[in-house]
Structure formats: structure tokens, C-alpha cells
Amino acid sequence: MTKLVLIIVAVSYLLGSIPFGYVLVRMFRGQDVRKSGSGNIGATNVARTGAKGLAIATLLLDALKGYAAVAFAFWIASRQRFEGPIPISVYDRMAVTMSSHTIFLLAALAAFVAILGHMFPVWLGFKGGKGVATAAGSFVALAPRAMLVALVVFVVVVALTRYVSLGSIAAAAAFPLCVWWLGPAEGTSAPILLLIAASSLLIILRHKDNIRRLLTGRESRFR
């Protein structure tokens, strides 16, 4: 089990830490996206360089790496077998399939670590993005129905306020509640919900500058 956890953590972090925004802008425009706008490596800041196509590609790839991390965790965990002895008169040993709850727990861990990887990529001195797109991809793989409701929250908040940052914060805050409400029984235990809540909290904390600007009325509106 320890080996499996280490594999999932390592793969999830490495996938999450791929700085697609930085790489794409460097490759196609010869610029360092960190020196533009907010200095972020995410799609929003890539768009500020004037490269709308690269911003869309960054958004999709950042989401895809989160999805891939969780999908990998589901795949490798579901293939595991644990051997346990039972009376020799019946069998020498038996293979016990990992429980659905444990599989969901490992997938939630993968989502958390992939988001961490995006926020703190080893390749860029542990200075990354806010993790919204990576979280969206991770959450789609983990709990698609809950993510759909969180997406509705995002769209409604942005439509009413024109603040993308506020929509992201609201969606992140709503997602754990959506999982609790809509998720399957094996995916709504306390440890899983705590990991999901921790992932959402990471995203909210990474928006601390946006929250400060929202409170002082200096946050830019979506146009």
C-alpha cells in the first residue's frame, strides 16, 4: 500500500507541475509569461500576453493534467490485489480487491497533489499558478456531477458580478458540499471530503491577492 501511495503521489505531482502556460509562451512567443501581468503561469495571464489561442491551449492542458492524475490513480488502484491468508484447508491464500472507498481516497489524494504540483512546480522554483484549471480537471475525473454544479456556481457568479476570481473562489468553496450532496457513498467519507476540502482551500488561499482587491474594489472585471 505504501508503494502504491508513493507512486500516485509522485505521478500526480509531476503531472501537475508541468508548467504548460510557461512552456507554450516561451516556445511560440519567446517570452517569459511570469514577466507579464500578474506574473502567473495560468491561462488568464497567458491571455494578457495577447496570445488568446495559447491561453485556451493552456486552460485545456492544465485541466487535462489534473484529469490525467486522478484517472491514473483510479486505474492503478483498481488493478491492485492484496493477499491475505485464510485456512489452508480451504485455500492457501486469496486475492482481495481493493475497496471502492480506498480507491476514491487515493483518487482524492491524486487530485490534491496534482493541484499542489501546479501551484508549486519544481521546474519553476516552486512558484506556479492558482490551480483553478488543474482542479477543474481533477474534480471532473473525481466527481463529475458535483463538478457540473460547481461550474454552474462559477458561471452564475461571474455573470452577476463580472469577477472571474470571485467565481473561481465560489466554485471552489461549493465543490466539497456538492460532493457530499451528489457523490457516491464510497466517495463521501470524512477522509475523502477532508482531502477535497483541502484542495478547495488551497485554491481559495492562492486567491488571497484577488480577495484583497475585491474587498478594496480594485479587482478587474471580466469584459
Image (cartoon, rainbow, N blue to C red):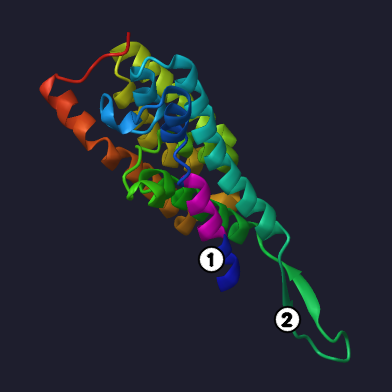
The answer to whether residue 64 is left or right of residue 28 is right
Q: Determine if residue 143 is in view.
A: no
Q: Identify the residue at horizontal 36%, vertical 46% (top origin).
A: 124
Dot 2, crowdedness within 10 Å: few (<14), some or many (≥20)?
few
- Look at label 2 and name its amino acid: Gly
Under tag 1, what secondary structure? helix
Up/down of 137 relative to 89, above or below: above
The answer to whether residue 183 is left or right of residue 116 is right
Asked if the residue under mark 1 is in contact with the one under mark 2, i.e. CB atoms within 8 Å, the reply is no
Task: Locate residue 130: give its quadrant.
Answer: top left
Eye-nearest disc, 2 or 1: 1
Up/down of 22 relative to 74, above or below: above
Residue 211: within the magenta? no
Q: Identify the residue at horizontal 39%, vertical 17% (top origin).
A: 156
The answer to whether residue 38 is left or right of residue 187 is left
The answer to whether residue 154 is left or right of residue 76 is left
Q: Identify the residue at horizontal 53%, vertical 32% (top origin).
A: 61
In whole angstroms, how far apart are the C-alphas of marks 2 and 1? 22 Å
Q: Identify the residue at horizontal 62%, vertical 57% (top origin).
A: 103
Q: Position of residue 208 (x, y in %)?
A: 22, 37
First to last magenta residue range = 8-16
Residue 15: within the magenta? yes
User: Which residue lies under the disc numbered 2?
Assistant: 84
Circle nearer the N terminus (2, 1)? 1
User: Which residue lies under the disc numbered 1?
Assistant: 6
Q: Position of residue 88 (x, y in %)?
A: 85, 91
Q: Quadrant of the N terminus?
A: bottom right
- Look at label 1 and name its amino acid: Leu
Considering every residue shown, the one lying at the far top of the view is 223
Under tag 2, what secondary structure? strand
Q: Position of residue 117 (x, y in %)?
A: 43, 49
